[in-house]
Image (cartoon, rainbow, N blue to C red):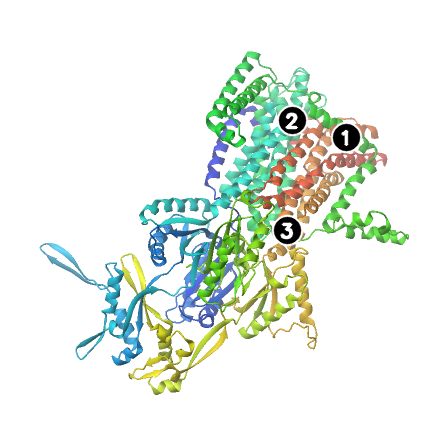
């Protein structure tokens, strides 16, 4: 089948060119339509249920809302965990589903379950689904800038809530726009209890009167004079949109009539406009602000959604009365910078690869054939990405970037072989066959017969068929090597599967182009006839003019400004380059290898060393063995590797440590540490310090503004956007005292010399750590959201304590905290336990017997407490499109002091006025500020940060062991960590993903390596030869480990993915080398050991140039990724380092494979084993063609 495809492409080259152009156009269209983001969506597959119950304590919400919902939602199909959080006034329940569960299917199942669970909730409490988005959907933060004449925070909030919010929410792809900051307007009815008693009005009557005063009614229609009139009565408060008129309407509301005199609201209290009770605020550079958060719908293209939002903002700004909207946190900047880093690296890789090919071949048209395959294969990859649903992000583009060197390998091998056959064919005058050195010289094309003088098409076909099986085998091993990535789970699968998909697509596309486009273009472009000088001169002048005009009018002025040159100079340079290229294209000829300096140099260096290796095999193989030892030492540590050697030396009475330099050499590599994933440098910090839960809202706001001013004074900081509490979204379950600050940094070119991003973070922590504020963990916006979504904590790692009672849970958390502070592996100042019972409470206990003497039940007393003290929003006014609450509450002076609350006058149903202390007892106590639960069990967290002395996985393992030992101590031991019965501990954090990935990779990688060996065996049908080719994997692995250790990179999933990519590349040159040795041996009569060595030597010289070209291009293609400094380069670099190190060791394969192959055959011959090579059998050319197919 493969031969048929190659035959068609060589026979119909122009049709192949047209199909290629069509694929490129389709690829570009696909690229423009696929989603673009900085990183893949690695958020949990979660459905959030928000249940508001205003004014209720966390304990009430936990017992009556969160716990019933959590237990009920555990039964939803596909649910992995149910995490609950009870806060003041709100219940949040996060249902995490398995990754394979469809997002909207999960929402529908949760919605169904809520229908049955609602019956278990208190009256009036209605659970609601959160937006159809993930926690990473918060892509755009903005603030409203008032005009110069000023506008109050309340006016700005109204503009945000009723104009800006709805305009932006209508943008395609936006799931929700959540408001934050400012004050929501509220009509406040302040009641005097003495006037209530005087007029004999109860709170119930007053509330009913206010509720009944806000109503429009309709009276059907009236017909007169042939017309129909709709009849309605206007009764909404402030229905004309005048807020002062709304106040008057409330004041004039009649409660009752006594002795013919109406009792109005104004008679028993006052009505005023004020701010509603709030649990969230926004700050910008130290000043309170009003803004919003744009939440992107699940599965949308973030770059496109942000652009649409910006377009809508530009469209509505003129109608906002001088108010402007400024984006503060905009993910599109991170997306653009990340994409620029990878696209520039891709561009540089293609250019470098083309230059290297040109240096090796000194033939522009051959270099063009190979170079054109790179963008073509990349565009073909975009088509596959579009159909599979893989977006463009740092990981998917990194897969293409890492694959560039491998992609060009296929085209190099095919084009180089075609070039070499054509050179030999032309050197023989085009009539002497393909040449003595070509394996394909005796093959005959079934479609292109070559009786005595093969045509150019026949030569191209036979040269392609000769190497096509090796190319397919190399591609198969590369693709199979990436199978382990598809077996990862959770965050690591979401993060690295785009890379695996794109690399697979790119390699497969490169293989397709190598066996289809390359032979077609070679037939068209690698012509032997040299054009006349006049034609070459015309081509040079034409191309010079074209490039000169393009340079002058398109890019010349831009490049001139960048390099400080005149535009005409760059135009002249472009014209000269165009003339030389045009002249050379029509005058150049196919050169034999002997005429190319780079090829001669490679063969000269390789020839002597290969001959020496074949004659002194043990000496030659000692070098890769030493490399393996050093690689193993880099992995596990040289002391571990050398320990057996030391034992043997000690047995013979030698002490190696006494030898000069041995100790230093032994500690060059101490072993690699394991760490969690490498976070993307987002260009901003996410500062989340911890305040004491007892802190009031105003105190937290003061801390926030002080911190933002101090942070803004750091020279590297551009903007500071701070938030306390929560935005009005189910995606933000933040308590009122929780601080979240987005610290946007200036471009690094504007930083102080020598300052790093980590230095900036340390300075942020230093200046913003105020008294009573716990330092924060180093997190970035996207990273912080991921951490909080995955584990429910705001730190990378913590110990989770499971329990049943809040008081016991609080004690257990403090005990764990004390134990962690003893560990030398932890920075004691960063140990931060949840203050489970850290919120002061004022609790009333109704005296039922005393209340009954006044004709009141406990519910009546509680209702008075709820309304008179807490205040109750009774109704909402309808003022055009705007809606504002009306609240009923006692006068402020009656509820300002805690001691005065017990003397609060209560008007009973009999009209008597009694102090509240006669109906209920008051006490202050400590209770929960928030209650967390996991699968129905109460939990508390103790977060911490390690000192970095080892990798995260090693440190967490040691800490877990320390806690286990402390729990197992005897009860009498004062150091024992004593927990109540039924309580348990668990280490949680993002490192759990690394542990799970390591567990899977431990068996998947060896399995895939065995599959690679099987594929190699299927190519050669000889286990010994397969092992010789397979030897490239451990050698490359050793080189990769040395590179990782030298660069100081810790082992994480990204690095292991780099090694997985390396395993597929490590055998490519070996496959090509062994395939040609095998083919050449079949053509020669082997009688002696010298015949074997000479044949292997000749085959090695024949294939060293393509092998060296593939190695050099792979290494050179990785250099732009390794030296890139832009956004996202650190993540791509971690995956490129092991590939680069392994490919540096790859040239050993060019000696190992021929040496082992030669040694294997020599052993067989010397010991008298039978082999077809010296039995004189030789396959017919037709049989060889069938076998090649």
Does 703 sit above or below residue 1072? below
Splitting the image into 4 quarters, where does residue 795 fall? bottom right
Distance from disc 3 to disc 2, alpha carbons, whole Å, reads 37 Å
Q: Is mark 1 on a helix, strand or loop?
A: helix
Foreground of the two, 31 or 708? 708
Whether residue 1050 is visible, yes or no, is yes
Judged left or right of residue 217, residue 1110 is right
In primary-sequence order, the first of circles 1 and 3 is 3
- Name the residue: 35% across, 59% down: 154
Is disc 2 placed on a helix, strand or loop? helix
CB contact under 8 Å: marks 1 and 2 = no
Relative to 653, 830 lies left or right: left
Residue 913 vertical position relative to residue 1022 in the rendered view, above or below? below
Vertical side of 718 occupied by 378: above or below: above
Position in image of residue 1035 (x %, y %): 73, 42
Residue at position x 62%, y 36% in the image: 1117
Residue 195 location (% of width, % of height): 27, 78
User: Residue 764 at what x, y percent from top left?
Assistant: 55, 55
Is tag 3's residue or tag 2's residue first in the polypeptide sequence? 2
| Residue 1052 numbered mark, or none | 3
* Viewer can see residue 99: no
Q: Distance between the residues labelled 1 and 3?
A: 41 Å
Q: Mark 1 points at which residue?
A: 1096
**Front position among marks 1 and 3:** 3
Mark linked to residue 359: 2
At 54% from the left and 38% from the top, the residue drawn is: 343
Q: Quadrant of the N terminus?
A: top right
Q: How far apart are marks 1 and 2 (CA)?
A: 27 Å
> Dot 2 surroundings within 10 Å: few (below 14), some, or many (20 or more)?
some
């Amino acid at each position: 089948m493969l031969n048929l495809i190659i035959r068609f492409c060589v026979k119909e080259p122009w049709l192949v060119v047209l199909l290629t152009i069509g694929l490129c156009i389709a690829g570009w269209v696909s690229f423009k339509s696929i989603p673009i983001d900085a990183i893949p969506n690695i958020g949990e597959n979660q459905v959030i249920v928000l249940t508001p119950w205003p004014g209720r304590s966390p304990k009430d919400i936990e017992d009556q809302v969160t716990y019933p919902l959590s237990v009920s939602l555990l039964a939803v199909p596909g649910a992995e965990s149910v995490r609950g959080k009870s806060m003041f006034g709100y219940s949040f329940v996060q249902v995490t589903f398995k990754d394979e569960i469809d997002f909207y299917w999960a929402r529908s199942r949760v919605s169904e379950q809520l229908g049955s669970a609602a019956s278990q909730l208190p009256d009036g409490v209605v659970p609601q689904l959160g937006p159809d988005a993930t926690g990473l959907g918060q892509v755009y933060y903005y603030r409203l800038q008032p005009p110069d004449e000023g506008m109050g925070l309340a006016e700005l909030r109204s503009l945000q809530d009723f104009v800006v919010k709805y305009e932006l929410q209508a943008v395609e792809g936006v799931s929700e726009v959540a408001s934050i900051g400012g004050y929501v307007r509220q009509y406040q009815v302040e009641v005097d209890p003495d006037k209530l008693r005087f007029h004999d009005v109860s709170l119930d009557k007053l509330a009913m009167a206010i509720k009944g005063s806000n109503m429009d009614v309709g009276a059907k229609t009236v017909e007169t004079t042939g017309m129909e009139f709709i009849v309605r009565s206007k009764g909404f408060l402030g229905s004309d949109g005048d807020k002062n008129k709304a106040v008057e309407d409330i004041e004039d509301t009649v409660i009752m009539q006594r002795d013919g005199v109406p009792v109005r609201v104004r008679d028993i209290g006052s009505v005023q406009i004020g701010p509603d009770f709030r649990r969230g605020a926004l700050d910008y550079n130290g000043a309170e602000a009003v803004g919003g958060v744009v939440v992107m719908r699940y599965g949308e293209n973030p770059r496109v959604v942000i652009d649409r939002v910006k377009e809508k903002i530009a469209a509505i700004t003129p109608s906002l009365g001088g108010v402007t909207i400024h984006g503060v946190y905009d993910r599109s900047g991170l997306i653009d910078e990340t994409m620029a880093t990878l696209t520039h690296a891709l561009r540089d890789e293609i250019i470098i690869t083309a230059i290297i090919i040109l240096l090796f071949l000194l033939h522009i048209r051959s270099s063009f054939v190979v170079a054109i395959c790179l963008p073509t294969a990349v565009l073909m990859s975009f088509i596959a990405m579009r159909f599979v649903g893989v977006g463009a992000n740092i990981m998917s583009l990194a897969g293409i970037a890492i694959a560039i060197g491998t992609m060009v390998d296929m085209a190099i091998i095919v084009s180089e072989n075609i070039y070499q056959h054509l050179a030999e064919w032309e050197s023989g005058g085009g009539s002497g066959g393909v040449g003595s050195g070509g394996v394909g010289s005796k093959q005959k094309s079934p479609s292109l017969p070559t009786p005595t003088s093969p045509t150019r098409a026949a030569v191209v076909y036979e040269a392609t068929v000769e190497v096509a099986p090796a190319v397919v085998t190399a591609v198969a091993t590369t693709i199979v090597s990436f199978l382990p990535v598809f077996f990862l789970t959770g965050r690591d699968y979401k993060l690295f599967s785009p890379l695996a998909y794109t690399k697979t697509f790119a390699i497969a596309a490169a293989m397709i182009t190598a066996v289809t486009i390359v032979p077609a273009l070679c037939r068209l472009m690698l012509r032997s006839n040299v054009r006349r000088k006049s034609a070459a001169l015309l081509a040079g002048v034409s191309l010079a003019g074209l490039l000169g005009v393009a340079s002058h009018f398109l890019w010349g002025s831009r490049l001139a400004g960048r390099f400080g040159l005149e535009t005409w100079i760059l135009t002249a340079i472009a014209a000269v380059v165009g003339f030389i290229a045009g002249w050379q294209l029509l005058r150049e000829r196919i050169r034999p290898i002997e005429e190319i300096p780079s090829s001669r140099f490679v063969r000269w260096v390789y020839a002597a060393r290969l001959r020496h290796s074949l004659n002194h095999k043990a000496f030659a193989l000692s070098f890769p063995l030493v490399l393996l030892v050093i690689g193993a030492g880099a992995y596990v540590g040289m002391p571990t590797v050398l320990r057996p050697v030391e034992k043997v030396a000690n047995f013979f009475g030698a002490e190696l440590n006494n030898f000069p330099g041995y100790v230093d050499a032994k500690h060059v590599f101490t072993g690699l540490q394991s760490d969690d994933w490498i976070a993307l440098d987002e260009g901003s910090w996410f500062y989340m310090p911890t305040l004491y839960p007892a802190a009031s809202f105003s105190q937290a706001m003061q801390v926030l503004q002080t911190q933002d001013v101090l942070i803004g004074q750091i020279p590297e900081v551009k903007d500071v956007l701070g938030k306390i509490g929560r935005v009005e979204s189910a995606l933000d379950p933040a308590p009122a005292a929780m601080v979240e600050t987005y610290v946007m940094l200036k471009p690094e070119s504007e930083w102080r010399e020598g300052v790093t991003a980590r230095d900036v973070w340390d300075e942020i922590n230093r200046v913003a750590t105020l008294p009573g504020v716990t330092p924060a963990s180093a997190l970035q916006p996207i990273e912080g959201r991921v951490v909080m979504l995955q584990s429910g904590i705001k730190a990378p790692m913590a110990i989770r304590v499971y329990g049943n009672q809040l008081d016991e849970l609080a004690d257990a958390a403090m005990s764990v905290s004390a134990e962690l502070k003893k560990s030398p592996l932890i920075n004691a100042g960063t140990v931060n336990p949840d203050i489970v019972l850290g919120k002061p409470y004022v609790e009333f206990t109704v005296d039922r017997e005393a209340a009954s003497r006044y004709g009141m039940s406990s519910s009546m007393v509680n209702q008075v407490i709820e309304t008179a003290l807490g205040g109750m929003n009774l109704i909402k006014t309808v003022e055009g499109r705007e809606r504002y609450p009306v609240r009923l509450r006692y006068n402020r002076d009656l509820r300002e002091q805690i001691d005065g609350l017990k003397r609060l006058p209560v008007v009973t149903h009999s009209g008597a006025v009694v102090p509240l202390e006669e109906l209920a007892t008051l006490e202050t106590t400590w209770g929960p500020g928030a209650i967390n639960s996991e699968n129905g069990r109460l939990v508390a967290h103790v977060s911490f940060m390690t000192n970095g002395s080892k990798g995260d996985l090693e440190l967490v393992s040691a800490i877990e062991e320390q806690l286990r030992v402390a729990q197992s101590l005897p009860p009498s031991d004062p150091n024992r960590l004593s927990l109540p019965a039924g309580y348990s501990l668990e280490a949680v954090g993002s490192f759990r993903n690394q542990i799970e990935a390591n567990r899977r990779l431990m068996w998947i990688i060896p399995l895939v390596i065995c599959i690679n060996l099987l594929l190699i065996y299927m190519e050669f049908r000889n286990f010994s030869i397969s092992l010789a080719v397979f030897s490239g994997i451990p050698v490359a692995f050793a080189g990769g480990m040395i590179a990782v250790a030298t660069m100081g990179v810790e082992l994480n999933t990204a690095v292991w993915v780099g090694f997985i990519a390396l395993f597929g590349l490590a055998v490519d040159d070996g496959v090509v080398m062994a395939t040609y040795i095998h083919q050449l041996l079949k053509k020669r009569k082997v009688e002696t050991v010298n015949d074997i060595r000479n044949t292997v030597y000749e085959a090695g010289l024949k294939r060293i140039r393509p092998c060296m070209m593939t190695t050099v291009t792979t290494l050179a293609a990785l250099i732009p990724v390794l030296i890139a400094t832009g956004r996202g380069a650190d993540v791509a670099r971690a995956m490129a380092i092991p590939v680069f190190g392994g490919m540096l060791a790859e040239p050993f394969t060019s000696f190992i494979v021929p040496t082992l192959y030669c040694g294997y055959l020599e052993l067989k011959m010397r010991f008298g084993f039978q082999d077809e090579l010296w039995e004189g059998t030789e396959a017919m050319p037709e049989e060889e063609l069938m076998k090649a197919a």
